[in-house]
C-alpha cells in the first residue's frame, strides 16, 4: 500500500541517502530520505507477522529496493538502513528477544537478517527512541539540543535524546518512561507490564478508559455516560469528543490525566534535565488545533511548573510532537545517518 506524502526528486536530493524502517505489529512503514531528511519515497505494508521473522526481514528489504527503484536510484545509493522495532530487544546484538505482538519472532537476529537481504549496513533501535529521534531531527524538537518524548496510546512509550545520542541503557531498556512510578501505594493501579503504580497505568489510553468506566459505574452522569449507555464504545476519542462538548466527567478525566502526566514529567525532568518534552501518540486530544488539546497541554505545564525546581519549571519546553506516526521511520533513517557519518569520520 502506498500513501501520498510530499517528496523531492532524485535530482533535488542531497547524497547520501538513507532508508528508515518502522516495524509495527499491524503495518510496517518504510521511507527513503536524503542527507537533510527530505523524503524521496514511502511505502506502508502489512507486516504479516504470521509469516515469520525471516519472511518479514526479506519483505522489509524488498520494500526498500522497491522504493529505491521507484525513484530511480539503486541500492548502491542507499548508504545505510535504519530499523526500528517494538518489544524487548538486545540492541548491541541486533536481536529481538520477547516481542509481545510477534510470538514467532522470539530471539531473532533481525538487524543482521535485514542487512543480509538489503545488502546494506543496518542501524538497530527501539521504536520509541527512533520516534523521539525523528522529532529531534525533523519534527517539533528540531531546535532543541535534547528532549524526552512520551507517546500516549495503548501504553505510554518513551524516548530520550541528548545531542545525537539515544539513551538505550546498559540492557537496551533506556527510555522506558512509561514505567516510572508515580504511585507507590500497595493498591496502586496495575500497569500492563504487571507492576503497580507506573505512569502507563494512569496515563495510557487504556488507563483513561478504565478510569472513566469506573466513574460511570460509580454513578457519574452526563453526555459521555449517556453515550456509553446508548451503546457507543468507550474510547479516548469518545472522551475527547464529549470534553469538547463540555461534559464534566470527560473534562475531569482529561485534566486529571494531564495532572498525573505532569507528575511523571517532573521526575523525568529532574533526572535528565532536557531542553524539552514532546507529547505524541494517538491520545493527544486533538493537539493544539483543539480546545481540549490546548487545555490538556496547559494543565500538564501547570503541574510541571508547580512541582519542578524553579529553573527546570520555568525553562522546560513542553509541546506536542509534529510528525505523527511517521516519526519512527524518519528517526530510524536519521539514526542510520548518524552512525554512517560517525563511522566515516573515524
Image (spheres, helix red, strand yellow):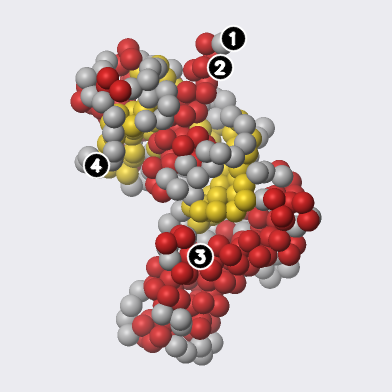
Q: CA distance from mark 1 to mark 3?
A: 46 Å
Q: What residue do we see at 24% from left, 42% from top?
A: 4
Kindly state the secondary structure of the residue where label 1 is placed.
loop
Q: Quadrant of the N terminus?
A: top left
Residue at mark 1: 346
Q: What residue do we see at 54% from left, 58% from top?
A: 192
Report the side of 297 relative to 283 (left or right).
right
Dots 1 and 2: beta carbons under 8 Å? yes
Q: CA distance from mark 2 to mark 4?
A: 32 Å
Graded by Cα atoms within 10 Å as few (under 14), some (14 to 19) or many (20 or more), the crowding at tag 3 reads some
Q: CA distance from mark 1 to mark 2?
A: 7 Å
Q: Nearer the viewer, mark 3 or mark 2?
A: 3
Across and down, in percent, residue 310 comes to 78, 56
Residue at mark 3: 294
Across and down, in percent, residue 121 comes to 43, 17
Residue 176 seen in the figure: no
Precedes in sequence: disc 4 or disc 1: 4
Graded by Cα atoms within 10 Å as few (under 14), some (14 to 19) or many (20 or more), the crowding at tag 4 reads few
Report the side of 91 relative to 33 (left or right).
right
Amino acid at each position: 500500500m502506498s500513501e501520498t506524502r510530499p517528496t523531492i526528486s532524485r535530482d533535488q536530493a542531497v547524497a547520501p541517502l538513507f532508508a528508515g524502517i518502522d516495524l509495527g505489529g499491524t503495518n510496517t512503514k518504510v521511507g527513503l530520505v536524503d542527507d537533510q531528511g527530505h523524503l524521496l519515497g514511502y511505502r506502508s505494508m502489512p507486516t504479516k507477522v504470521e509469516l515469520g521473522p525471516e519472511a518479514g526481514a526479506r519483505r522489509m528489504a524488498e520494500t526498500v529496493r522497491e522504493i529505491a527503484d521507484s525513484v530511480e536510484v539503486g541500492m548502491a545509493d542507499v548508504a545505510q538502513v535504519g530499523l526500528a522495532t517494538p518489544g524487548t530487544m538486545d540492541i548491541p546484538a541486533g536481536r529481538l528477544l520477547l516481542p509481545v505482538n510477534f510470538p514467532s519472532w522470539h530471539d531473532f537476529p533481525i538487524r543482521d537478517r535485514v542487512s543480509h537481504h538489503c545488502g546494506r549496513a543496518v542501524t538497530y533501535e527501539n521504536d520509541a527512541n527512533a520516534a523521539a529521534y525523528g522529532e529531534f531531527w525533523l519534527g517539533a524538537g528540531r531546535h532543541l539540543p535534547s528532549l524526552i518524548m512520551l507517546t500516549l496510546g495503548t501504553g505510554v512509550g518513551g524516548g530520550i535524546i541528548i545531542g545525537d545520542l539515544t539513551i538505550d541503557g546498559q540492557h537496551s531498556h533506556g527510555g522506558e518512561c512509561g514505567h516510572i512510578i508515580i504511585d507507590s501505594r500497595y493498591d496502586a493501579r496495575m500497569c500492563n507490564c504487571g507492576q503497580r503504580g507506573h505512569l502507563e497505568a494512569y496515563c495510557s489510553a487504556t488507563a483513561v478508559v478504565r478510569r472513566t468506566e469506573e466513574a460511570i459505574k460509580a454513578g457519574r452522569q452526563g453526555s459521555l455516560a449517556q453515550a456509553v449507555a446508548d451503546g457507543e464504545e468507550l474510547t479516548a476519542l469518545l472522551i475527547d469528543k464529549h470534553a469538547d462538548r463540555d461534559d464534566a466527567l470527560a473534562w475531569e478525566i482529561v485534566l486529571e490525566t494531564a495532572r498525573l502526566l505532569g507528575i511523571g514529567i517532573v521526575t523525568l525532568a529532574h533526572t535528565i534535565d532536557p531542553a524539552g518534552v514532546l507529547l505524541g501518540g494517538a491520545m493527544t486530544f486533538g493537539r493544539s488545533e483543539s480546545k481540549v488539546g490546548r487545555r490538556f497541554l496547559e494543565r500538564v505545564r501547570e503541574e510541571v511548573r508547580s512541582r519542578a525546581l524553579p529553573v527546570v519549571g520555568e525553562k522546560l519546553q513542553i509541546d506536542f510532537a509534529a510528525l505523527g506516526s511517521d516519526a519512527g521511520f524518519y528517526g530510524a533513517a536519521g539514526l542510520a545517518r548518524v552512525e554512517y557519518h560517525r563511522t566515516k569520520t573515524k
